[in-house]
Amino acid sequence: MRVEIINVEFDRLTTRVIFGGTLSDRKGVNLPDTVIPIPALTAKDRSDLEAAAEAGVDWIALSFVQRPDDVAEARKLIAGRAGVMAKIEKPAALHCLDDILEIADGLMVARGDLGVELPLEAVPGKQKLITRAARRMGKPVIVATQMLESMIVEPVPTRAEVSDVATAVYEGADAIMLSAESATGAWPDKAVATMDRIAREVERDSLYRGIITAQRYEPQATSADAISGAARTISETLKLAAIVCFTGSGSTGVRMSRERPETPVIALTPIPATARRLALVWGLHCVLTEDAKDLDDMVSRAARIAVDEGFAEPGQRIIITAGVPLGTPGATNMLRIAYVGRNGATGN
């Protein structure tokens, strides 16, 4: 529905209906080209957010983000108990996207509401802009809304929808998300299976790797990013079986994912919440394990898990990234190449 505001009073807007229809309660209202001077979180939102954080959810998606302050408020309330995913569905957010990315743990391209306030033809370009900004900053990005919309009522999608999902995968999105298709649709299992098949087929396509590589950004000027970039280069040059990264907070795993390596990446963490949160991130196979006791234990543990999880065989080599001293958050500063023996690593 669309109306034009023709008069503004203190507690009332008078409008002229342009496209009408039946209006029910609890519906959203979009004001194009307007930054609404109210917080993103209502009192009920704060209560719901606290309940979700207490329940142990891994990610909380924040709707209708307009400015970095909206994300900062949510982060303060969550207090590290979950990742904060900023939903980009307001054009105002596009003007401060990098600032939002600095604060958020990830982005969601919420194309439904974004397409209400932007011209429809502008949405694909903004989707690419948001996806690439998140990749540049090393933050996970989800593409969502109307991915397989026809499967709300039909058992198969349209060819255009299949192409749309594939485009998001080719672009390097960390995740693609169903909405009404699986929430209220008639074919939720078929919708999930269809989405999965499309993603797998794209990643097998001969053009996929070239497209992903062409979109790669130079590592940021930190030791952890430099280590991750070097691990990717070494693993591909030497044709190693796997990259194994030890991570407590999850930041090492996210940095490794940012490189989009051809080599499989195994993220090892002793923290269940970190392992669950990283499951969203591109290319990471997360395994829960105890912290390594020393460097020898670190190498043998990495090699053993690489074999147990089916990524390496005895005689192959893996590359390991970690922080020394072991267990220090955010201190990725070490690379180690190890041979995989029958009972673990046998040499460098």
Image (cartoon, rainbow, N blue to C red):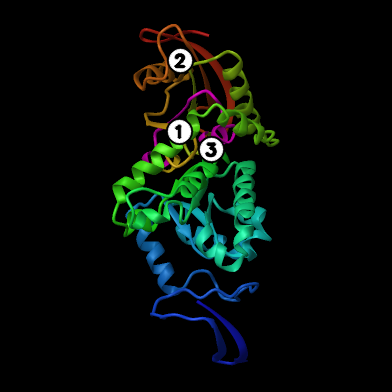
Tell me which amino acid carries mark 2. Asp
Q: Secondary structure at mark 1?
A: helix
Question: In the rendered image of this protein, does residue 194 appear above or below residue 16?
Answer: above
Check disc 1 and report the residue beneath it. Answer: 201
Residue 179 picture location, percent across and down: 40, 56
| Towards the viewer: 322 or 191 | 191
**Spatial separation of the CA atoms under disc 3 and disc 1:** 24 Å
Residue 254, numbered circle: 3
Q: Of the residues under marks 3 and 2, which one precedes in the sequence?
A: 3
**Spatial separation of the CA atoms under disc 3 and disc 2:** 25 Å
Q: Residue at x 44, y 80 (%)?
A: 21
Tell me which amino acid carries mark 1. Glu
Residue 311 picture location, percent across and down: 41, 20
The crowd level at tag 3 (other Cα within 10 Å; few <14, some 14-19, many 20+) is many
Question: In the rendered image of this protein, does residue 214 appear above or below residue 70?
Answer: above
Q: Name the side, left or right, on which 340 lies relative to 329.
A: left
Give the mark count: 3
Question: In the rendered image of this protein, does residue 332 appear above or below residue 27?
Answer: above
Residue 140, numbered circle: none
Residue 175 picture location, percent across and down: 47, 44
Check disc 2 and report the residue beneath it. Answer: 296
Q: Residue at x 35, y 57 (%)?
A: 152
Q: Is residue 314 visible?
A: yes
Q: Name the side, left or right, on which 315 lies relative to 115.
A: left
The verdict on residue 176 being magenta is: no
